[in-house]
Image (spheres, grey):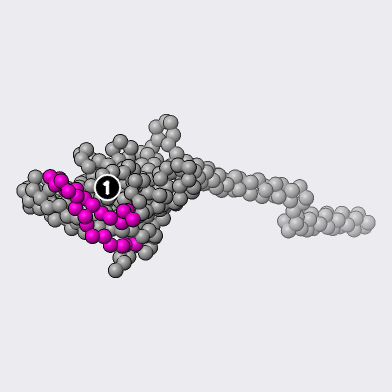
Amino acid sequence: MDAKPQAEKVKEAGKDREQRLFESVESSADVPPGRARTIAVWLGLFTCAILVSQFGRPSRAREAEFMRGAAKVAALGKVSAGAGSAGDAAAVKNLAARSAEEKALEPAVYASRKYGVAWQYPRNFVLRKGANAGLDLDGHYAAATAFAGDDGGVALASVIIPARLYPGTDFVKASLTARVNKRVNEEACGTFRILDEGEEKAQDFPAAQVTVGITEFETAEAAIDGDLDDSATTREKFFHVYENGACYEFAMSVTTGVGGEKKALGHVDADEVFERLQEILTSVTIVPVRGGEAVVVPTVAVAPSGVVRHK
């Protein structure tokens, strides 16, 4: 009689253990144990590390490319000893060409400490000084002198406009020659006297006053027809100023062809050429001289006033 109830109790106890086991399994599905959680965390971190490393590689590549580009910019304009790429060589060549163009736009400067005079002139003109100061590119006198008296003074320099600047025209030559004469006094400095070829007596030319730049000059003009085998005409202008106990002369000469083979060429207006020479005269600066040397080195500056004639 007691055996049956005892068997039922054992059976019920087994059912309770099965129920608790299923409940334990179901609860484990909702909340993972500590070890599983740790593994899951490490897996997540490992995955993130892989992603970061993979996506970080392009960034480093871009940084390296940027550094290479920066190095090329820093080396721009520097000519290396070794052979460079065609692109780099072209860039250097273009930079050199731009530098040459900028330099060509800057005027050149002539200065004489001994006589305290300076001026500026275009770099595409030709400067002759020393033993060739008074000669043109063909070895002839660039311009006559108009000093009163027999002494022609000292030629300092001549600025020549080369014929290549007037291709296909009847332009022959043009120049500006600077001279200094210490044997001419202040009164005689305002007198212009020219001895033409084949004549025994010099001819005086009427003078006028003109202000060019910052300097007031006495000026006169002469024309010589039929020069150079009757195929050209030469006009000359003279500018005198008395400074430092001497007479400074700036003689301009312009020759254009009017005959022979020059007839078929384009005509050059001599007045326009004189304007180019007068731009040089505008920049002339004369400073006091003591002990055979200028007190202050002349500073050349183009005055905006240009040319003002005094009536």
Q: Vertically, is 306 above or below 189?
A: below
Q: Is 72 colored magenta in this rendering?
A: no
Residue at position x 41%, y 55% in the image: 301
Tag count in the figure? 1
Residue at position x 57%, y 47% in the image: 56
Q: Is 210 colored magenta in this rendering?
A: yes
- Label 1: few (<14), some (14–19) or many (≥20) C-alpha neighbours in 10 Å: some
Range of residues picked out in magenta: 187-213
- Between 116 and 31, the one lying in front of the other is 116
Query: Which residue position holds label 1?
Result: 149
- In the shown orientation, is residue 214 left or right of residue 149? right
Q: Is residue 83 visible?
A: yes
- Between 239 and 75, the one lying in front of the other is 239
Q: Looking at this rendering, what residue extends furthest in the bottom direction? A: 311
- In the shown orientation, is residue 195 left or right of residue 124? left
Q: Looking at this rendering, what residue extends furthest in the right direction? A: 2
Position of residue 81 measured from the top left corner of the image (x, y, whole percent): 43, 31
Three-letter amino acid code of the residue under disc 1: Gly
Q: Is residue 128 visible?
A: no
- Between 50 and 194, the one lying in front of the other is 194
Residue at position x 48%, y 42% in the image: 291
| Res 216 → quadrant | bottom left
Q: Looking at this rendering, what residue extends furthest in the top direction? A: 82
Q: Secondary structure at mark 1?
A: loop
If the image is split into quadrants, where does the N terminus sit? bottom right
Position of residue 299 measured from the top left corner of the image (x, y, whole percent): 44, 51
Position of residue 47 measured from the top left corner of the image (x, y, whole percent): 63, 47
Residue at position x 31%, y 62% in the image: 209
- In the shown orientation, is residue 250 left or right of residue 169? right
